[in-house]
Amino acid sequence: MSKPTESVINSSLAGEKIVVDPAKRPSALKKIFSHIDQNVEHYIDTLREAVGIQSVSAWTEARSEVLRMVQWTGEKLKKLGCTVEVRKNGEQDTPEGKIPLPPIIFATLGNNPTKKTLLIYGHLDVQPAKVSDGWDSEPFVLTERNGMLYGRGSTDDKGPVLGWLHAIEAYQHFNIEIPVNIKFVLEGMEEVGSEGLDDLLRAQKDKFLSDVDMVCISDNYWLGKDKPCLTYGLRGLVYFFLEVEMGTKDLHSGVFGGSVREAMTDLIWLLDQLLDDKGAIQIPGILDDVCPLTEDETEMYKTIDFDCKAYQDDVGIKELRFPDDKVQTLMNRWRYPCLSIHGIQGAFSDPGAKTVIPRKVIGKFSIRLVPNQTPKEVHRLVEQYLKEKWQERNSPNRMLLYLAEEGIPSWTANPFHPTYRACRQAVAYVYGKKPDMIREGGSMTSVLYIQEVTGKNVLLLPMGASDDGAHSQNEKINVTNYIEGTKVMAAYLHELGKVKGNL
């Protein structure tokens, strides 16, 4: 499937006719929205049940809880009339030996050949969480404070998954026919790399996934806290290890300091060559494959609702790299690659003082990729540059650069695709305004897997706000986002029924 370049991301959206007057909502949606409003407490109680299941995929001792979450969700789907298959997903190697991977739900609602089929992906596992990490309440007890629902998984990704189920239930309450067939793929290992998902999806390419027309994933967030958005792009990732070794053992600085070429100083010098003092990547050729910036694209960024000062305050830093420059800040979050240094393995990092000279240190850094860049080419450029710098350093120590894994390409969908247009209308029916069209700076392997296997356009539909803290302490989802987001999902199903032709 071809990917659009920045040169086509222009004012084509400007003339799009979207109904933003809530009074002009279709009668079916008025009923459904009213039903959703009348069931807020029920939806919160259901989320409370889900959050109470400690489905932490990173804790092997909690694997039974992940399985319980899969089974719990499967029962919810069956009550909606879905055909549910819980497929085995192989085994995982752990220090304690092999243990089963959580099974993956493949569910189907409707098989009308005259309707299009929507695939919904979500995940049922969550990040680790303990009160001792700094939570203000028990992370696995949903706690409501000031219109916010705190609990691990509330926004990532149990709340959004439940939103789809509640939207379907609202249609069924009024015996309103759902305009599309729906398929679900719900996994329990997303937070630790979606192990096993790729193989299982490929095995189902010509079976369960063969009739999919469009894909929607709700596992991301608004750009800010006030305006809804749709996401059509993600950056990729290449993670590097840069190793410098000087000898066979650690040394005492009082005995050997000054008489040896230390590995740590070599490594820090090399890392310092990667970025200039403004944070720009110094590797020659790294920007050659990045799509040229157009005037139309710049204008699109200008219309996005984003406040630099609020962003700076939320991040908790003294100053942005581009102070008060919304366009540059957003472009450098989304459309340009960035390089970040993450740590040094082998260095003394415990409290107190220790006068060791480490024999070997490993610097860790990553580069976020954008469309047209490939992990292979970026690896080549970085390796070539660091070898040249190492020769310039003229150190007797040994230097080695290698990857953590092959790397994750960037992902870009077509924001002019009919499914995006349908979702913009769905958002407008709920919020009375068009959503911003954005990218995000992170990476999601599941998006790439699903788009590659289905060959269909993927839409990222965020439910939560930018301050939800998905992987942090005090993860939450706003009650309004949870409820209004459910309405958007219902409206999206309605609008997808109008999409015609081959997709």
Image: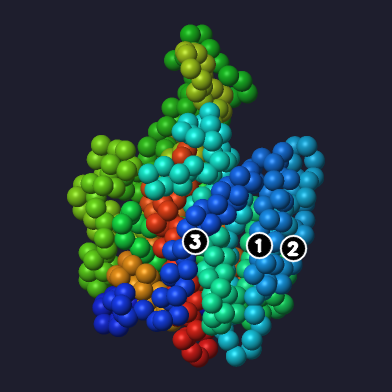
Is 237 situated above or below 355?
below
Marked residue nearer the N-terminal end (3 or 1): 3
Q: Which residue is mark 3?
A: 39
Q: CA distance from mark 2 to mark 3?
A: 29 Å
Count the marks: how many? 3
User: Which amino acid type corresponds to the residue marked 2 in the rendered image?
Assistant: Val
The tag earlier along the polypeptide, 2 or 1, is: 1
Of labels 2 and 3, the one closer to you: 3
Q: Residue under circle 1?
A: 76
Q: Residues within 10 Å of mark 2 (few under 14, many from 20)?
A: some
- Residue 86 is marked as 2
Front residue of 233/435: it is: 435
Q: Position of residue 393 (x, y in %)?
A: 42, 35
> Mark 2 or 3 closer to N-term?
3
Position of residue 355 measured from the top left corner of the image (x, y, whole percent): 49, 13
Instruction: List x then y, in percent, for residue 159.
Output: 52, 55
